[in-house]
Image: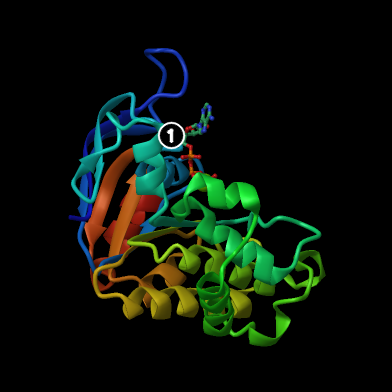
Amino acid sequence: MGVRLNRVTVSYGKRGGASALADVSLEFRPGEMVGVLGRSGAGKTTLIRCINALVRATSGTVEVNGRSLAGLGARELREVRSRIGMVFQQFGLVPRTTALTNVLLGAIGQRPAWRNAVGYFDAEERARALAALEAVELGGLGSRRVDQLSGGQQQRVAIARALMQRPSVLLGDEPVSSLDPVTSRGILELFARIHAEDPRRITVVNLHDPELALAYCTRIIGLREGRVVFDGPPDAVDASARLAIYGG
Ligand SMILES: Nc1ncnc2c1ncn2[C@@H]1O[C@H](COP(=O)(O)OP(=O)(O)OP(=O)(O)O)[C@@H](O)[C@H]1O
Ligand SMILES: [Mg+2]
């Protein structure tokens, strides 16, 4: 179980060009909260997007919960993805729609297609969506349109939507980079709390701010030019590790 990348290379362009990920082998185990650090262009987003097959490995394999993503058909892929929550920098909410509806939409990957076609959410789903909004401390704002929420509140809605999936893997691609420092800490705290609620959950989050990663993550991966240049606990991130990740 868990997430395993085995010699993954991702090249977006022609052969011979630099690879966004170059021969990356990593295993994320249940319970880990992983912070991915690196300069702009280091491959952080590419790594995150490999885990839910938004980006395909040019070579190597990605396994989630024991299943290789490469061989999956559309239906199986949908099934695997339905348990992978994703939170983006720009929130990715459906505008002009209420917070509650946005959270409910997190459930649709796990419903039979005919139920999505009817556009109906049952009582159990509504109760779970309300609980997810409570969990992100937006209990009173379910009926508010998301475009009338602050950035931090919108990101909380996005997290509640991910929670609706009861994710075994929770991914965040720079989830706080459009938020102020205080709000950012609040969102990371929320990630950490949600992470801890399920001892088997794997959380992987890209962060520009290394201090946030060190404060909340249990494991740090440093990427540089598509390669893993650091992998260890937060307290092992010393000056030489910082230099390897960010320096010169
Ligand atoms: N869709 C794409 N097509 C071509 N090249 C891409 C594409 N996406 C990313 N790249 C390239 O792949 C490399 C890694 O990009 P990636 O987005 O993974 O970096 P990142 O670490 O997330 O950077 P940032 O911190 O700026 O978000 C970069 O050189 C980038 O230009
Ligand atoms: Mg990125």
Q: How is the image coloured?
A: rainbow
Residue 97 seen in this snapshot: yes
Q: Secondary structure at mark 1?
A: loop
Q: Is residue 46 left or right of residue 57?
A: right
Residue 225 seen in this snapshot: no
**163 and 60: which is toward the camera:** 163
**21 and 111: which is toward the camera:** 111
Please tell me which residue is depicted at 82% across the width and 70% down the height of the picture.
148
How many tags in the picture?
Answer: 1
Q: Is residue 27 left or right of residue 37?
A: left
The answer to whether residue 184 is above or below residue 175 is: below
Please tell me which residue is depicted at 34% across the width and 70% down the height of the picture.
217
Where is residue 78 shown, x and y percent of the image?
Answer: 42, 42
**26 and 115: which is toward the camera:** 115
Please tell me which residue is depicted at 70% across the width and 77% down the height of the picture.
142
The answer to whether residue 79 is above or below residue 110 is: above
- Label 1, ligand 1: CB separation under 8 Å: yes
Q: Amino acid at mark 1?
A: Val
Q: Is residue 173 left or right of residue 97?
A: left
Where is residue 105 shown, x and y percent of the image?
Answer: 59, 59
Where is residue 29 shown, x and y percent of the image?
Answer: 20, 60
Quadrant in the picture for residue 134 = bottom right
Quadrant in the picture for residue 37 = bottom left
What residue sits right under mark 1 in the picture?
A: 55
Where is residue 10 shown, x and y percent of the image?
Answer: 36, 29
**111 and 208: which is toward the camera:** 111
The answer to whether residue 7 is above or below residue 209 is: above
Q: Is residue 165 left or right of residue 199?
A: right
**Image quadrant where one finds the N terminus:** bottom left
Disc 1 packing (10 Å; few <14; some 14–19; many ≥20): some
Can you name the residue that lies furthest to the top here?
15
The answer to whether residue 52 is above or below residue 216 is: above
